Amino acid sequence: MSAPVFLAEPGTLDGVRAGDSYRLGGAEGRHAAVVQRRAPGERVDVVDGRGVRLLGVVDAAGPDGLVLRVEERADEAAPAVALVLVQALAKGDRDDLAIEAATEVGADAVVPWQADRSIVQWRGDRGARSRAKWAQTVRAAAKQSRRAWVPDVDEPHDSRLLAARTAEVTAAGGAVLVLHEEASAPLATTVLPTTGECLVVVGPEGGIGDDELDRLRDAGAVAVRLGPHVLRTSTAGPVALAILAQRLGRWG
């Protein structure tokens, strides 16, 4: 069984090497020692969310956290093509389910999209709280899936901002793929970039409006068909990312 993963803040693992002693404190350390009751001799990994992984063994455990003996340090490079899920805001917990599964699959970033047909609205304090909740969701999913990278959660985009970002991404050699049930081009054979970003755009329950689709296409996006069935907004993104991860060699 793989070792449990605990998160340190980015930069705090700089300079830590194999053979060093490392103290995992704070909320993560207390959770490991007090709640999970990790004991001396157990394997534990510590990551910083930016690709650094310490493979350690618990030397001591107490109310303040764990003391680890670092057996190995691994620095995992960022992928050449960043997979970005642009997830339309959805009612209930469907957008939360989407970003959780997308993180487990390997999304490198998620973008909250205030689509024209999104019922949910992120405004003011509610928007800040909702974005913080998304950040916590991807953080927990990254730990559960033993990832060394934690996806970024971008600022919310409306359709105008998403079109502007689409133009920037495609001009830089990336790709923006809009999942659409009426598209003729299959995702499985769409040409993918070799560097930069690959955005996967998923609409809300009511679908992507014609004006929105035209605006994104005019900015350089490509509408693609995921498969023979129409998936929910909570499942379309993770399924698409799984296909792309396989095609990009991440799951080889």
Image (cartoon, grey):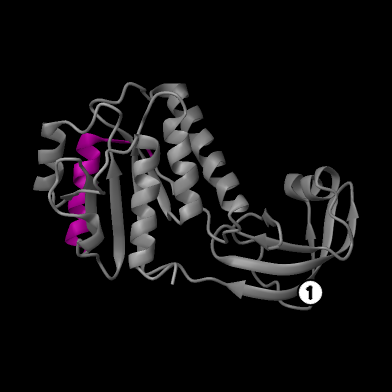
Give the quarter of the image for residue 229. Answer: top left
Q: Does the magenta stretch include residue 224?
A: no
Q: Is residue 152 left or right of residue 31?
A: left
* Image position of 68 with respect to 6: above or below: below
- The residue under label 1 is 20
Q: In this view, does 98 lie to the left or right of 114?
A: right
Residue segment shown in magenta: 155-172
* Image position of 234 with respect to 248: above or below: above
Classed neighbour count for the residue bearing mark 1: other residues with Cα under 10 Å, few (<14), some (14–19), many (≥20): some
Q: Main secondary structure of the magenta part?
A: helix
Q: Is residue 156 visible?
A: no
Residue 111 place in picture, x, y as percent: 37, 43
- Looking at the rendered structure, the secondary structure element under dot 1 is loop
- At x 20%, y 42%, the residue is 180
Amino acid type, residue under disc 1 in the picture: Asp
Residue 125 place in picture, x, y as percent: 47, 23
Front residue (pair 69, 203): 203
